């Protein structure tokens, strides 16, 4: 097959695929309308017949008034002082503001020993109700971590362990400990001198 044939066939195939997907979308809408009509005739709600769902990865977490949800991590090896950084969304379930005061975080990459004691970069972070601010935990990498971990640049998956504390007035709130949670991120640069 030459490029002329490919340049003719490719747009036609794309148009046919788009038409099929459009038709399937229309069929899906019709099926939804029929399902609604059928359930209204029967007098039952489809949601009432479904069992309660649990979400994998969150079912074994301890109950808490707030939660930290992972966004990403990054390791900057080419910085003047190489560092690791992790970002989390903080979600409060209370109707009043709370103050995030402490995070104890460790991240494990490549199945190697964990990078421990990554502190919250800004202490005393206020979290308003119905808000999910992004908080950052960051620290410089030690010389032994730079030498001993098998660094490779690019996208990487890791796991983290975390315990967080917040204040609700004078009451101390705790989230965690949570462990073996997945966090995605990037490793940029290369270790200097290698």
Image: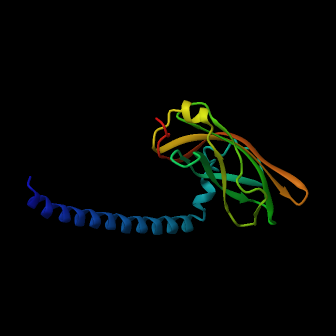
Judged left or right of residue 191, residue 83 is right
Foreground residue among 183 and 76: 76
Q: Residue at x 32, y 63 (%)?
A: 21
Foreground residue among 82 and 58: 82
Name which quarter of the figure residue 130 lies in: bottom right
Judged left or right of residue 21, residue 38 is right
Judged left or right of residue 117, residue 28 is left
Q: Residue at x 48, y 37 (%)?
A: 193
Q: Position of residue 156 (x, y in %)?
A: 49, 43
Q: Position of residue 192 (x, y in %)?
A: 49, 40
Name which quarter of the figure residue 109 lies in: top right
Residue 140, compared with residue 35, is above or below; it is above
Colour scheme? rainbow
Name which quarter of the figure residue 99 lies in: bottom right
Residue 165, compared with residue 92, is above or below; it is above
Q: Residue at x 71, y 53 (%)?
A: 67
Q: Position of residue 65 (x, y in %)?
A: 78, 54
């Amino acid at each position: 097959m030459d490029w002329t044939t490919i340049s003719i066939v490719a747009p036609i195939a794309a148009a046919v695929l788009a038409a099929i997907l459009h038709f399937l979308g229309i069929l899906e809408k019709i099926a939804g309308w029929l399902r609604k009509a059928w359930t209204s005739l029967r007098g039952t709600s489809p949601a009432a017949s479904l069992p309660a769902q649990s979400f994998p990865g969150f079912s074994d977490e301890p109950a808490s008034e707030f939660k930290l949800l992972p966004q990403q991590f990054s390791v900057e090896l080419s910085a003047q002082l190489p560092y690791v950084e992790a970002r989390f969304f903080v979600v409060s379930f209370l109707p009043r503001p709370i103050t995030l005061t402490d995070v104890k975080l460790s991240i494990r990459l490549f199945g190697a020993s964990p990078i421990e004691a990554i502190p919250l970069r800004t202490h005393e972070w206020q979290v308003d109700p119905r808000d999910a601010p992004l908080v950052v935990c960051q620290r410089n990498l030690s010389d032994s971590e730079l030498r001993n971990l098998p660094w490779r640049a690019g996208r990487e998956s890791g796991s983290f362990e975390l315990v967080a504390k917040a204040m609700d007035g004078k009451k101390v709130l705790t989230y965690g400990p949570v462990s073996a949670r997945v966090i995605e991120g990037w490793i940029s640069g290369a270790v200097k001198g290698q």
